[in-house]
Image (cartoon, rainbow, N blue to C red):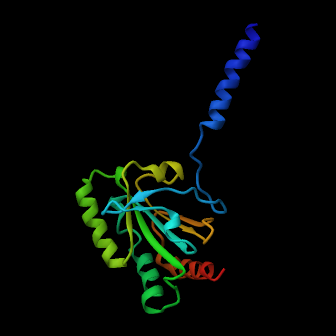
Amino acid sequence: MKKTIITLVLSLFALTGIFGQQNVKLAVGMKAPDWTFTDADKKEFTMNSWPGKVLQLNYVDPDESDLNDSFNDAVKKATDVDKTLSKDLFKGFGIVDCKSTWKPNGLIRMIAGNKAKKYDTTILFDYKATLQQSWGLPKDNYTVVILDKNRICRAIFEGHIPETDNKKIVDMIIGLTKE
């Protein structure tokens, strides 16, 4: 009888561990779990807000907001100047990890508004670090995730992207838009 009770209790703990684990670290080749966040006007967005487009998702600690400006400038040049990256097939946007900073939300929205204007993009707000936790993204960082049209993760860049890598990454994004 004792063995049966112990086995039952251990089985319950094992099942809780299996079924209670919803957060999985996003990796290249995985389908990215969906999310819902709002912009400064409280309009809700999901990955499906941009159907059929390759996505460049910048998940940003506000304290690191300028870390990958050279990369984003290269993407902007490819879309606006060189016209090698079509806005009809691609969407780059930011999600601010508001929980990773001491900055008040009003200041965060002001900084994000300036970035949205500079890059002519959408900035969303993750007030509870939901995406950081559910996708296993690093805290206090700047992470760029590239998703293909089917929301399969094709690349993850954590931290600073060296300028020498900008062209290679932009070319990869261009290639994904042609698939």
Closer-to-camera residue (100/2): 2
Image spot of residue 135 (x, y percent): 54, 53
**Residue at 59% in and 48% down:** 24
Image spot of residue 148 (x, y percent): 60, 71
Image spot of residue 161 (x, y percent): 48, 70
**Number of on-image labels:** 0
Give the left or right position of residue 38, taking residue 9 as reference: left
Closer-to-camera residue (23/138): 23
Image spot of residue 149 (x, y percent): 60, 72
Give the left or right position of residue 107, taking residue 57 as reference: left
Dividing the picture into quadrants, the one containing residue 43 is: bottom left
Assign the C terminus to one quadrant of the image: bottom right
Assign the N terminus to one quadrant of the image: top right
Give the left or right position of residue 38, taking residue 50 as reference: left
**Residue at 66% in and 36% down:** 18
- Residue most extreme to the top: 1
**Residue at 66% in and 25% down:** 12
- Residue most extreme to the bottom: 82
Dividing the picture into quadrants, the one containing residue 20 is: top right
